[in-house]
Amino acid sequence: MTHRIFFTAALLLSLAVCSNAQFSVGISTGANVSFWEWRMEALNLDLDYDPGLGFRTALQAGYQLTPGFGLQLEGAFQRISNRLDVEITDANGSSTGQMHRISTVFNSVGGSLLLKFSPLKKLPGLYLATGPTFVHFTDGWWRIPGGAVEGRPKAWRDHFKLNESPARPDQWLADFGLGYAHGFGGKNRLAVDLRFQHGLNNFSDVEGINARVQNLLLSVGFQRNL
């Protein structure tokens, strides 16, 4: 329900200003690094997750209202991950003294509504961007290295059901970023964008767990005025 309200509001806002705006479409792709915080309050325990790599690909629609201000809508597919060192035990539950690095990976779809500002008239291609992002996890898995389980010498993926996962499938994030767009050919732009996404709600829906996800994105995009 929340994502329907988000996209309906974005559509109404875009229709209200389209008569005075320069419309553009584009696509972007790039890498992201995810930072996860996961604290079990009852145990006073912080899981020491290491950052994980992923990627994001987005379709874009932009409205340039004035030379210094514009809006950008995005529909995106994004993959995030983390890494955790886990101690291996034998069949009796005793420690083997071995540690293995297990990754948790989520795929998601979602969208963003960004406000874009160009603060310097001498550098019109430089911009700041901020706004909300909504993501919905579609699937997830653990990437387990070979040897972590007896009889499994090769690495494998262990998919899990999202409704059985401690992660909340719907997430809201606040985006803050900056970038530079270089125009060429009259109507075309090539943009490089660095963005930070800060999780706004608890990453877990399990009582007693306080979790948060944050992402750092670096992307390259192509945009064309219509």
Image: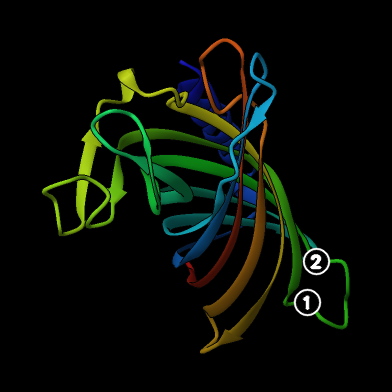
Q: How many marks?
A: 2
Q: Amino acid at mark 1?
A: Pro
Residue designated by label 1: 124
Element type at mark 2: loop
Residue 90: image x %, image y %? 28, 37
For the residues labelled 2 and 1, say whether their Cβ atoms are less than 8 Å apart.
yes
- The residue most toward the top is 207
> Residue at horizontal 55%, vertical 59%?
33
Residue 176 appearing in the image:
yes
Is 27 on the left-hand or right-hand side of 41?
left
Q: Name the spot of residue 95 as percent of width and height, x first.
A: 39, 40
At 58% from the left edge and 37% from the top edge, which residue is drawn? 47
Q: Which mark is residue 180?
A: none
Classed neighbour count for the residue bearing mark 2: other residues with Cα under 10 Å, few (<14), some (14–19), many (≥20)? many
Counting residues from the N terminus, which is met first, the one under dot 2 or under dot 1?
2
The residue most toward the left is 151
Q: Residue at x 64, y 19 (%)?
A: 43
Task: Quadrant for the N terminus, please.
Answer: top left
Q: Position of residue 19 (x, y in %)?
A: 61, 48
* Image coloring type: rainbow
Does residue 33 appear to the left or right of 137 in the view shown? right
Q: Could you say which is closer to the camera, residue 10 or residue 160?
A: 160
Q: Which amino acid type is marked by label 2?
A: Ser
Q: Residues within 10 Å of mark 1 (few under 14, many from 20)?
A: some
- Real-space Cα distance between discs 2 and 1? 6 Å
Position of residue 89 relative to residue 171, above or below, is below
Residue indicated by mark 2: 118
Vertical order, 78 against 31 (above or below): above
